[in-house]
Amino acid sequence: MPGDAPGGRIVVVGASLAGLRAAEALRDGGFTGELTLVGDEPDPPYDRPPLSKGVLLGRTRADACGLPSRRPLDARWKLGVPATGLDPLAKQVLLADGERLGFDRLLIATGTRARPWPDPGEAALDGMFTLRTSRDAERLAERLDAGPRRVLVIGAGFTGSEIASGCRERGLAVTVVERGRAPLIGALGGTVGAFATELQRAHGVDLRCGVTVTSLTGHDGRLTGAVLSDGERIDADIAVVALGAVRNTEWLAGTGLAAGPRGVACDAGCRVFDMYGIVTDDIFVAGDVARFPHPLYEYQLLALEHWGNAVAQAETAAHNMISRGPDRRPHLTVPAFWSSQFGLNIKSVGVPTFSDQVVIAQGSPGERRLVAVYGYRGRVTAAVTVNRAKWLEYYQHLIETAAPFPPDPGAADFDGSEPVPSDVPDPRVLSHGPTVYVTGHLPLLRPPSRRPGG
Amino acid sequence: MSSPETLFRRITDYASRADPYPLYAELREHGVARQEDGSYLVGTYDEIAALLHDPRVSSDPHSRAEPFRDPLALQEGMPVSFIGQDDPEHDRLRRLAMRHFGPPHTPRRVDALQGELVRIAEELADGFGDKERLDLVDDFAFPLPVTVICRLLGVPPGDVQQVHVWADTVVAGLDFTPDEDPEPRRRASLEARAAMGRYLGELAEERRRRPTDDMLSALANDDGPDGRLTQPELMVTSVLLLIAGHETTVNLISNGMLTLMRHPEAFEKLRADPTLMPGAVEELLRYEPPVQFLPQRTPLADIEVGGVTVPKGSPLILVLAAGNRDPRRFTDPDRFDITRQDNQHLGFGSGVHNCFGAPLARMETRVALTTLLARLVGPRLLQDPPEYRRSPVLRGPRHLPVARTPGGR
């Protein structure tokens, strides 16, 4: 498709939030050519956040989470058909049903899938679950309806914590096993991690941190429990594996694109790099599978598993796919996400792991309402609120303007807290994968060989 | 006379009521304008938005420095409603009230009113009968919201008129006209507020004995995670909801009709396609916001905004209606465009104090305007500009006389 011609053929691989919003933005932007959406799941695009919340609680049906469409698309849908390969020279996407889809421009929006339990035999036991798709949520909710004696949640990131919260709200006994020192510590650091520990215990979660599940036990093909690294045994008839996500990039193997386990690398305008770091001009990426450079975070490549990022990046990618060079725009959105668990609303802006210090700028853990502000080398880089979301815009502005850390005092509900180390652990010590991946390095976690004087 | 130091005096002058927008444009040119009395006026969108989100800006009248303190606003004995408090107390009280008004705990209270609201609006319109001349304020915009908010809270129909009189007196007290002694009106206002509080307190006691399904029953009986409102808290909170729940909506509806009648093409477009109504209501909230400015903010520290340092304790006045017409934020801001996109106006404020009743106000205005558009055939404004109410804050027509061809539906 030469120049900014509004016609041609565009293929979007991935028919979830990012794929759908990109397709809509392409049409909004005046693209009149052939548009094809490819998705490996059989369902039309649906919203995932409710799956670990309302659906798990039985309040919302899994099949009622369809994403509302913003406009008619006039597109061809290939649903339930995974893409299996890409021929960048012939400009064709290969599909599992043998079809080859030619394109002038391609958008990769294949997202992630749940990281499976590493032992396939144990993973096949009846009672083992992951939670990523609508089908997963439907099956898990059914099993929770049946009233299991105990649910084991492996991994205490956001998904694991929300599942534990949903189980407790249903009155079910829950054990959470996390290899790190605290729930949510990987994304939010030690201060909020300690808060989350208190929160889970206060809600009756049997929380085991600093241990791992070494094996799962079964009888007659059914899960019966788990053995932990400290020798303890847990009886459970359901286990939910919440070990984070795997990026869906295998189909791009051998294409020469910069695609791998950490995602598909792109420039600030969502154009995909090849393995030599040379930018392609007709292949774009958006959503959970993308790794993109962010100026607020030293142009390191970020990979974000955030709803809002998927939407914003899809819109930028779509715009750039149908715009000439000087009209293209960068994807600069400040990362943001939310979670609801144990009756609290947790929201975040910026990248909390990109920090060396944190201060409670408003409220306190004791009142279960707080704003934690994160800083790196004297500038504000992130903020997390617990039941205080309406203040986030202020802190987002501080992040965008690289305001000094700690922020100026003066808030009516600031209790004089001093900054403390943000205590962000190396992701390798966690059960769950990080939901924000700062690819280059975490500020305080440089490999020993690169430490100055080391 | 046209020094930026006198802008607030000129804006509040009753002579400016019909069209304060040129003064707002002048204010925007000065960004943050210090007034002769030491208060600060802000009229640009970005600066207002930043201050609305800044945790160092207080809504508590106690935060004012000594010379700016208003003894009447600081009356002992009566707790302050959450609109005049800061976190964490503001958050606790607002959360306790919100539990029984909106999502996530009470997602359907507002929606459930829709049918009733349509019925009330139709009844009021039926009351037009064959009259060729109407006052859209007295005949429609005034009675509608008070009936609705009373129904929502659980005030019996027989008491609505009394509540209405109290609410009027309270609002008259919020008014300020320079060069006039505000004392008598403010005293009457406080008395009305107290009488209203006592009345609602007694009603709540009744609901404790015999709960019904209205919001007052819920407020009086619920024990949520934050505990229960004390009796005085319940009284001031329900007074706040009653007053805020109707005085502002009256203006939104009557400003709305005035604006639509001044823009006949928009009027006809909306009548032909009611699905445009939600966007039209947003544009009205931008173009003629029912709350023109927030006069009650105070910085808790020296705050720099728009290149000016506003000292701790100074009165800070955020002119929402000026921000809503800021050309740096809105394309062609003085144009009334019911299909405007990207319309994040300040009509409901923003931040932690953003309008509590916004979903109700939106629904009431949609229903009210849809009903009026269907019923008014060949409407003409009989007086333009109409006579305005005194208040420069809650700005709107006192009367809106129109002529029409009778009988339309």
Image (cartoon, helix red, strand yellow):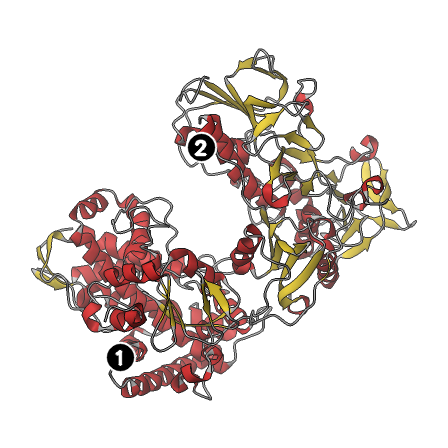
- Contact check, label 2 and label 1, Cβ < 8 Å: no
Check the residue under mark 2 and report the chain it is in.
Answer: A
Residue at (65%, 25%) from the top-left corner?
A: A277
What is the chain identity of the residue bearing mark 1? B
- Horizontal side of residue A66 vs B383, given as left or right: right
Q: Is residue A380 above or below residue B203?
A: above
Callouts 2 and 1 on one subunit: no
Q: Position of residue B204 (x, y in %)?
A: 44, 78
Res. A174 visible in picture: yes
Q: Secondary structure at mark 2?
A: helix
Q: Quadrant of the N terminus of chain B?
A: bottom left
Amino acid type at circle 2 is: Ala
Q: Mark 1 sits on what residue? A: B178
Left or right side of A428 for B300: left
Which residue type does callout 1 highlight? Pro
Report the residue marked by disc 2. Answer: A25
Residue sitting nearer the eye, A254 or B48: B48
Q: Nearer the viewer, residue A343 or B205?
A: A343
